[in-house]
Image (cartoon, rainbow, N blue to C red):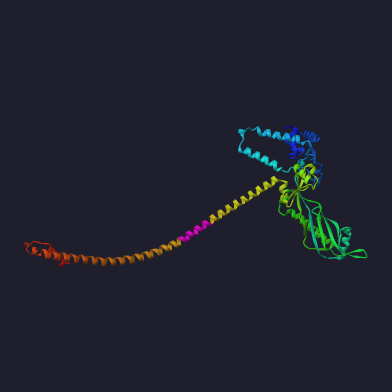
Amino acid sequence: MDRKTEIYYMIIHEGLIASRISERLGIGRAAVSKQIKKLSSGGFIQKAENFLEHNKQLDQVAKGSATGKCNAYVKGTNSELLESKIRESKASEGGARGAGARTGADDAIDNMDRLADEWQINRLPGGRDPYIDVHRIDYTLRVVGIVNEELFSRKVAKDFAEPKTLMRGNWGTWGPLEIATGAEGELGWNAYINRQFTKKENELEWLASATSVRLTLPKRIWITPEQARIEGLAKSLINNGLWECINHLGKEYGIQFGLPKERQSEEYGVLWNDPSLAKRVKEEGVVHIADGIHADDSHGLVSEGIVHIDTDSPVKAADVANPLAAFAGGMKGMREFFDNAQTILNETTVMMEERLLESSDRLAEINQDQVGIVVDQMANSWQGKMDHFIKTQETLWAKERDTFFDKQRKAFDKIVEHFQEKYGKIFKERSEGQSVIEDWITFEKENQ
């Protein structure tokens, strides 16, 4: 890209101011200003006059401005000529890598670039940071009593405007009375008192009483996306101002109130730089985007490609103001969650190990005691049983031994008798001095 196109890209697509462009390109600020003038005179960019006027409410100066002032620019009538150059330059840079050199990381980066273009990350002109405005703040306070009726009638007649047109039935609305709240009185609430009256000879006589007080906040409360993510902070800013008003009215006018009641839910808005969406808003009015989110031209910046996104919660507005910060915050939250989970897991593991070690030691002691008792009981029981068993067996063996030998003796005697009957004659005719088996049998019987 040539120098003019580079500077155009940094102004429109990156939201940089002249001093930041000068640092980025390494050229003098005068050279950058000269190119900006050429872009402006050529119709490629135009000063965002309405946005600058709107931004004065915040007293915000872009960071890094050398002069303390900085202009904001949006696309001009001839911007498409340079936009086409930028697209061609990106395409040529993408093809110069060569098909063989591409990796999975290249594909992922290209895909992220494509998604970033589709998401259209919010970049306000002149490097301005998006702020969130809280608006549509409207409450009703029910009056439960008047402490000093004379003080009430006198002070209300003095400070509140008597109604001329806000008359319904037998009551009318007095006001508004501006009540300054905040650290420096920067927030001015409007108070309206509903009073009853009677008519006598076509003259109104206002009673020293009131039915309710309405509090509205015409100005917007400005907070950063980071503050919007703090739970309850936006609501606390409203409640602080609300209670300041209640205290002031109670002290100055002697009014006692019930609890405040919300007439309508407040909205949280943020500016969004998107010419295509601005075109739709210009044609359709209010454009519904998602549940609780819509776009409109309540700030009158559609002609410069900037719309106002209204949401029903501060967190949604913070997400719209900086989508990447929302994603990063979610990732940070997940990381903190897993870090905490890991810490808890580690601590739990250590605790379980200590408990298990203590339990195992205790179980070992118990088991040793129990095993000792069981061993003693088993030893005593086993010895007794073995003594009884041996004694029983000895008695049984003695009986079986006697029975066995008795049977053997009787069987042997029968054999001898049978032998003598059959071979006795032979023994009688033996030679003198000759011994036979019968002699041994007789000897055994006589010497048993």
Residue 272 placement: quadrant: top right
Residue 116 placement: quadrant: top right
- Residue at the (28%, 66%) spot, across then down: 396
- Residue at the (56%, 55%) spot, across then down: 351
Residue found at the far right of this picture: 201
Q: Which residues are magenta?
A: 355-367
428 vs 220, left or right, is left
Q: Pick whichever, 285 or 396, lies toward us.
A: 285
Q: Answer whether residue 397 is visible to the viewer in this image.
A: yes
Residue 202 covered by magenta stretch: no
Q: Is residue 381 above or below residue 310?
A: below
Residue 359 covered by magenta stretch: yes
User: Looking at the picture, how far across and down is residue 433, in whole percent?
Assistant: 7, 62
Rendered-image quadrant of the C terminus: bottom left
Q: Is residue 85 above or below residue 335?
A: above
User: Looking at the picture, how far across and down is residue 259, in whole percent?
Assistant: 77, 62
Q: Pick whichever, 77 or 47, lies toward us.
A: 77
- Residue at the (67%, 46%) spot, across then down: 327
Residue found at the far front of this picture: 284
User: Looking at the picture, how far across and down is residue 339, in whole percent?
Assistant: 61, 50
- Residue at the (47%, 60%) spot, across then down: 365
Residue 438 placement: quadrant: bottom left
Q: Pick whichever, 236 or 164, lies toward us.
A: 164
Q: Pick whichever, 283 or 322, lies toward us.
A: 283
Give the overall secondary structure of the magenta segment. helix
373 vs 144, left or right, is left
User: Looking at the picture, how far across and down is residue 194, in whole percent?
Assistant: 84, 61
Rendered-image quadrant of the N terminus: top right
Q: Answer whether residue 25 is visible to the viewer in this image.
A: no
Report the label total. Answer: 0
